[in-house]
Image: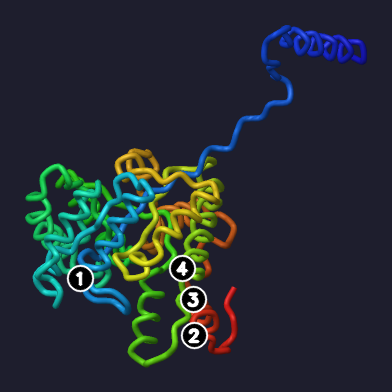
Amino acid sequence: MTGLRFVLKAMIACIALAMVVPGKRTISVIASTPPQAAKRIALSFDDVPRGRGAFLTPDERTARLVETFRSRHVPQPVFFLNPNRIVHFGDGIDAPKRIAAYVAAGGVLANHTNTHPKLSKVAADIFLADIDRAEAYLKTQGKAYRPWLRFPYLDEGGPDKAKRDAVRAGLAARGMMNGYATIDGSDWNMEGQAIAARKAGKAIDMDALRDLYVETHVRSADFGDELARRALGRSPAHVLLLHETDMAGLFLGDLIDALRQDGWEIIGADEAYADPMHRERPDVAWTAGTMIEQLAWEKKLAKPRWYERNDVKVANALFAERVLHEKLGAGK
């Protein structure tokens, strides 16, 4: 056996020497290891169009987002619309122009229901009818439309599997797919905290808010990717859940820069949803959350299976201490 090992080592050494050719680049084939798959992520925005936030008018917010898409070369972000809000928000009169601006910047449009109902709270037929009302508007949007549904609150029926399956069947009958998110940093909650602080007349440290917003989402992306590698054995094409918030208008460029510095490639929505993972249908006791969280739960992976800053108690403590400089106890 010792002689065999000697022969094998000698053969390997000969192969290595043979790869060294005078005047040519030396090619190493011995010590190489497969490179880790690139981290890829698409940007998605829920609750479009939103009304006024804490810092910007809706028109200012859209202008900032569009400029960020262009300056940072963001391919094909996707906007999940609630068409009812186009006419019922106080700032709704300019919403069609804002939506058109997103499309002109390369964005695509998808369904977030018409009135944003929570599936756990309504019957399946009512929920599907609300989807249809949104589709009536979206199908007028030409090539920008995509037949994807993002469930409001990421709620697919909670513990009611019969309701979950009825809606899944309804989507299939309509030629639609679930527009899952895989990464979530609960930016909606941070936006709510900023609005409340502004209304209360509290001083807001904008630099700290930017840093918290960016840090929270980069950490969420890395957490979700690690969880995906555990659940799938690979890094899938991710979709980041954001909302059309003032913080996105103000800080999205900083977030994109930080993601790229962290090794992420920003991809388009079509590329992301072409990943076969997005056609999985996890069977879990409580159907809600991101695709990755549901897959991790289905496979009974060891905890943690949820990003800690999506716990509003943790997130609010961080916001109070770091942004408002109120010493209420830090989160992690």
- Of 307 and 167, nearer the camera is 307
Q: Secondary structure at mark 2?
A: loop
Q: Residue at x 50, y 56 (%)?
A: 258
Q: Secondary structure at mark 4?
A: helix
Q: Residue furthest bottom?
A: 200
Q: Amino acid at mark 3?
A: Ala
Q: Earlier in the sequence, mark 2 or mark 3?
A: 3
Query: Does residue 86 lie above or below 14 as drawn?
Result: below
The residue that disc 1 covers is 122
**In the rendered image, which quarter contains the C terminus?**
bottom right
Residue 182 position, x and y percent, is 41, 54
Query: Does residue 168 lie above or below 120 as drawn?
Result: above
Residue 321 position, x and y percent, is 54, 83
The residue that disc 4 covers is 213
**Residue 313 appears in the rendering:** no
Q: Closer to us: mark 3 or mark 1? A: 3
Q: Residue furthest right?
A: 2
The residue that disc 3 covers is 315
Q: Amino acid at mark 2?
A: Leu
Task: Report whether 130 appears left or right of 210.
Answer: left
Q: Amino acid at mark 1?
A: Val
- CA gap between label 2 and label 4 equals 14 Å
Q: Earlier in the sequence, mark 4 or mark 3?
A: 4
Residue 187 figure quarter: bottom left
- CA gap between label 3 and label 1 equals 29 Å
The residue that disc 2 covers is 324
Q: Secondary structure at mark 3?
A: helix
